[in-house]
Amino acid sequence: GAGGLRTGTTPIGNSVTYTITIGSGGIGGASSSTSESGGNGGSATTMSGPSPISVNGGGGGGGHSGPPSDARQAAGNSPDPLGGSGGGGASGPGPDGNGGSGGTYGNAGGTGGSYGGAGGGGAGGAGADGTASGGNGGAGLQIPTTYRNPAASVGAPGPSGVGWFAGGGGGKGNPAAGTGGGPGGPYAGAGNAGSYQGASALTNTGSGGGASRQYNGGGGGSGIVLLAYPS
């Protein structure tokens, strides 16, 4: 699942020092025929100060091992309060196919289907459920115009222009894999799922990586902090 997108205002005086910590994206699950290797959740991005600002990383996607064990690992939640989005559920029936829950700034991952894994949640919408095909990742969000500068483009393309962040990764499926950041993508830098290697999310987008049907899942994108001030 993706992280979250949080905007707001805070006073910053002269000659002060604040610490900004950029959270890392979660590591995708490793390929295994005997172990239900799901993805790992991301870590929080924070800014210190009199009114600290923080958003937690997204939850890792569920895992599903091959025969003979056919075991599953449940998708991860994003810790709340200040949570991002939940991971997409693994394919197959039962509670271990449920998506991870989202938090304050995100949405839940979808539920896995008969053969298709679910999409991870995004800041702008929940991940789609899997069917025989993989579910698409949840939509990201576009940053306000205050933070969009053509001379220093940030984020990734989305359904309407640039500056999109925190889209959910696509779920694995057969015959079709899920798309990162919603149908028509990949959007917001989120990773598509694949029959082989899942695509990793773009750096500094806070988006989720795509699942894999046979090999390693893609990693999540690291976070980012943008500051806008009068010139």
Image (cartoon, rainbow, N blue to C red):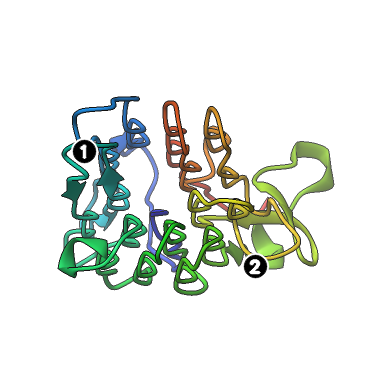
Q: Position of residue 85 (x, y in %)?
A: 35, 62
Q: Label for residue 75?
A: none
Crowding near the residue tagged with mark 1, few <14, some 14–19, many ≥20 C-alpha atoms within 10 Å: many
Q: Is residue 220 above or below residue 226?
A: above
Left or right of 22: which side holds 184? right
Question: Residue shown at 65%/67% (left/top)?
Answer: 144
Q: Is residue 150 above or below residue 146?
A: above
Question: Residue shown at 44%/57% (left/top)?
Answer: 115
Q: Dividing the image into 4 quarters, which one contains the N terminus?
A: bottom left
Q: CA distance from mark 2 to mark 1?
A: 40 Å
Q: Which residue is mark 1?
A: 36
Single out the residue that lies furthest toward the front.
68
Front position in the image: 76 or 13: 76
- Secondary structure of the residue carrying numbered label 1: loop
- Secondary structure of the residue carrying numbered label 2: loop
Q: Is residue 124 above or below residue 85?
A: below
Q: Give the image quarter of residue 96.
A: bottom left
Q: Which residue is mark 2?
A: 144
Residue type at mark 2: give it.
Answer: Pro
Q: Position of residue 201 (x, y in %)?
A: 54, 38
Residue type at mark 1: give it.
Answer: Glu
Q: Give the image quarter of residue 35.
A: top left
**In this rendering, does residue 47 appear at all?**
no
Which comes before the other along the chain, label 2 or label 1? 1
Front position in the image: 39 or 26: 39
Question: Residue shown at 55%/44% (left/top)?
Answer: 193
